[in-house]
Amino acid sequence: MRILITSASHDRSAALADHLADRHEIRLTERTHVETEHEFVLSALGHDRSTNLLTRDIDAIVHSVEPLTGEDANAQLDAATRGTYNLLMAAAEEGISQVILLSTLELMAAYPPGYRVRETWRPLPDTLPPTLSAHLAEQISREFAREGSLGIKILRLGDVSNKTVADAVSEALAQPVPLTASCRSNDSTAPHALSITHVGERPQ
Amino acid sequence: MNVLILGGTGMLGPYVARELAPAHNLRITDVNPPEDDLPGEFLHLDAADLDGVVAAAEGMDAIVNLSVLRRDRRIAWDVSTRGCYNMMQAAVTHNIRRVINTGPHFTVAGPNVTECFDFGIGPDIPPQSGTNIYAITKSMGLEICRVFTQHHDINVQTYLFYNFKDPEAIQPGEHYAPFVISWENAAEVFTLGLDIELNALPSNFEVFYVFADMPHGKFTNEKTKRILGFQPRQDVETLWK
């Protein structure tokens, strides 16, 4: 499988690339240059043809919206919203079968301690860019899934190791690709166009 | 009341400015210059400029956001999404409790809301904009406003529109969307939004559909009439009569 991983400058993306490289072809991307032994494509995730070329011949995307060092709030929000939209639009146009969005369990931290918070519960983001950005990236992904143009799996990560993340991504990649039709079927065992999985414990 | 209007020189802005000017002090911002007779103080400002929006909001009692960019896939995010973030940061910074946001009807009712088949579509459905660039950028702006109201003592009213008409220019048999209002009638809702006591609103985050009474009943403006006291004019009825 050919996998595109975004936010390549983040330690977790680098570790994920190393882990998946044993069984998959990896392409990393970031909006600034990153030294890596894997294939790397510099991309601002703009709405031009370059984002289509970035995603061409890719089977799956593992996307996260990590800020660059020193990036201000507006730049973080821009990357999380416009960048995610452009990436997913290109992915849909290029016929990519699945997208995994790495989000955060910080979105569920505001629920009272001790509550058994499920994936179906409403996210409670704060107004700070890291969690607000993650929330908006989820919301944008949801609209692509709702329209059936992409199958999207959201992994909301707690404070877990890179190995745990890599295992969760590998498991998600191995699961059936969400289908548009299944979203509207009565088959409760069928995969949905949008699935959310909590990985690790939520902060409380 | 001192009112900051973001995006005030666009299509709706001049109508809103003329409506509000007799009772309020206006500071109007936009990237485009104003008409010669636009009332109020004018500042050249991009809604995507966080520092500029925060500075423009100093001394204001309310913010009205009319900024919009519909089709450009970069500027739409700058203005319609991050513009809302900047506006809300300005409201927090200056303790401004009254914010009026605007957008198109499909900020909440995207393609999965079947206006072809359904009736009585109201503004309190779960937002589902779809991926149209105009709709989704405004919808993310709306969500930013909602999140801020969960954490700060700020009231956001969002007015959603669909199709504006100039009653004098309506031609018999011309096309119209199932959600129409005249420019002048649309502007009147902003007076209501500035006048209403904030504790008279059901919550600190409310969405309103603003349009004339229309016979087909596709959408409903009942909430806007009931809560804000909005009075639709009967000035676009030649569209269907």
Image: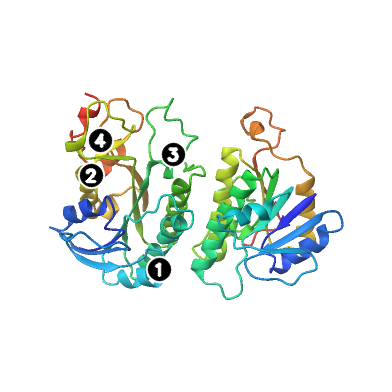
Residue at the extreme right of the image, as rendered:
A22
Q: Which residue is mark 2?
A: B183
First in sequence: mark 3 vs mark 1:
1
- In the image, residue B113 above or below residue A72: above
Say which chain tag 3 marks: B
At a point 48% along the width and 57% down the height, the residue shown is: B74
Inspect the image, locate mark 3, and give the three-letter code of the amino acid beneath it. Answer: Ala
First in sequence: mark 3 vs mark 4:
3
Residue B4 appears in the figure: yes
Q: Nearer the viewer, residue B122 or B103?
A: B103
Q: Nearer the viewer, residue B61 or A177?
A: A177
Label annotation for residue A196: none
Mark 2 vs mark 4: give the one in front: 2
Q: Label 3, label 2: how many angstroms apart (C-alpha)?
A: 22 Å
Q: Label 3, label 4: how many angstroms apart (C-alpha)?
A: 18 Å
Q: Secondary structure at mark 2?
A: helix
Residue at the extreme left of the image, as rendered:
B22
Q: Secondary structure at mark 1?
A: loop
Say which chain tag 2 marks: B
Q: Which residue is mark 1?
A: B49
First in sequence: mark 1 vs mark 2:
1
Label annotation for residue B212: 4
Whether residue A81 sits left or right of residue B102 in the image: it is right
Whether residue A61 sits left or right of residue A106 in the image: it is right
- In the image, residue B166 above or below residue A87: above
Density class for disc 3 (Cα within 10 Å; few <14, some 14-19, many ≥20) is many
Tag 1 near tag 2, CB within 8 Å: no
Q: Secondary structure at mark 4?
A: loop
Residue A39 locus on image (x, y percent): 77, 63
Mark 3 vs mark 1: give the one in front: 1
Q: Which residue is mark 3?
A: B109
